[in-house]
Amino acid sequence: MSAAGDLFMDQYPELPRTPVPVEPYVSDAFYDKERTAIFKRSWVNVGREADVAEAGQYFVRNIEIAETSVLVVRGSDGVVRAFHNMCSHRGNPVAWEARGKCRYFTCQFHGWAYDTKGALVHVSDADRFFGINLAENGLTPIHCGAWQGFIFINLADAPDESLEDFLAPVTEFIDGYPFTTMVKAHGYRAVENVNWKTLIEAQMEGWHLPYLHKNTLARTATDKGKRFKHAALKAFGPHSLVSSAAPETFSPSPVAAISFRYGVGTFDAFSVENETEGKGPKWHGAFDLYHIFPNFYVGMLRGTFFTYNVWPLARDKTVWEVTVYYPPVENAGQLFAQSVGSVGLRDTLREDAFTHEQIGRVIGSGAKKYFHLQDEETAIRNFLSAVNERVDA
């Protein structure tokens, strides 16, 4: 029995310690409640400002659980805006490509056209319509904001809180990280047969590293033969932090040892302790992984960061997007180091994805009614409490 104050859960006496019911993972009715209570009301990340760096650049984000397609565009005035990707005439998407650049969005059904600020500027055969008011029939706007170059939207008619207030508990610790100095290097996308909460929760604890990742990430991020313990577990309202320390001893593979001469790749950066003095983010460990409720992660390491976007497609089907960022490559050695890191991270993610689907394959059997969480899984408790609080409301 742990002494008082020895448990991460002791920080949060309001979190329950009871078993977790399985039903919300397999219930279509609960999934429908999540659609309305969470994904149609929460701030969610849809991309980076760098994705729309120039006027007229746009991208489309289809959000199946919210039953909409979102068009994000930098207007001719330089402002980044978000709209429902839906023509006012008969509902056809005005942008069919995933990304591009244009001066006008012209519906390919009947030719109605909108400018990059969402205004309706052309109605085909306008004299045969009955009193169309152009000013009232532009693209339907979506609340849109940015923080550290990350673009967030909120689909509610009136969000419960501003983006700044929503992120406030987390920004105190993250602000100062050099996000804008890094560019997309590579990424992965997987469509998994699993409930979105299972996928989210699997990234909320490192306790599984010595078991699931014993031949991959565990060689970099944990001390061999020792039980894994987080450097920190924190709850910031609905958001969470999961942090791991660098191992006491680290013996890189021969290939990793060579890559270390030229830079730190994502995979091996788990073994590099961060400097906590001076300006910059408030580090808790070598790897600080922030979960931004409901479906976004920012994983920060020295010299590199990555993001997870988790998008439910159905109660038992989810998209997992992983994007890795580095400073721009300046020589072949740096490219080599990044490539070594990408392979190590890829293999770890494949182990995760396989396990997610294994759970998704059997969780609906009814064989188990409850799950049991321990102290190293405190962030999962916080996440589920946030989900339940919104669904119950």
Image (spheres, rainbow, N blue to C red):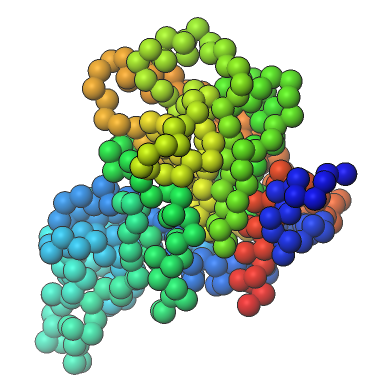
**Residue occupying the far bottom of the picture:** 131
- Residue drawn at point x = 35 percent, y = 15 percent: 262
Q: Is residue 328 left or right of residue 392?
A: left
- Residue drawn at point x = 57 percent, y = 16 percent: 250
- Residue 99 visible? The answer is no
Q: Nearer the viewer, residue 29 or 257?
A: 257
Give residue 278's position: percent from left, percent from top: 37, 39
Q: Is residue 50 above or below residue 84?
A: above
- Residue drawn at point x = 67 percent, y = 75 percent: 392
Q: Is residue 191 above or below residue 157?
A: above
Q: Is residue 213 above or below residue 384?
A: above
Look at the image and tell me in which quarter the N terminus lies. top right
Q: Is residue 346 above or below residue 67?
A: above
Give residue 377's position: percent from left, percent from top: 70, 47
All told, the count of numbered labels is: 0
- Residue drawn at point x = 70 percent, y = 32 percent: 228
Q: Is residue 197 left or right of residue 271?
A: right
**Residue occupying the far front of the picture:** 277
Q: Nearer the viewer, residue 193 or 180?
A: 180
Q: Nearer the viewer, residue 302 or 357?
A: 302
Q: Is residue 296 left or right of residue 206?
A: left
- Residue 327 visible? The answer is yes
Q: Is residue 315 left or right of residue 324?
A: right
Give residue 266's position: percent from left, percent from top: 45, 28
Look at the image and tell me in which quarter the C terminus lies. bottom right
Which corner quadrant of the image does residue 312 belong to? bottom right
Which corner quadrant of the image does residue 242 belong to? top right
Give residue 105's position: percent from left, percent from top: 19, 63
**Residue occupying the far top of the picture:** 254
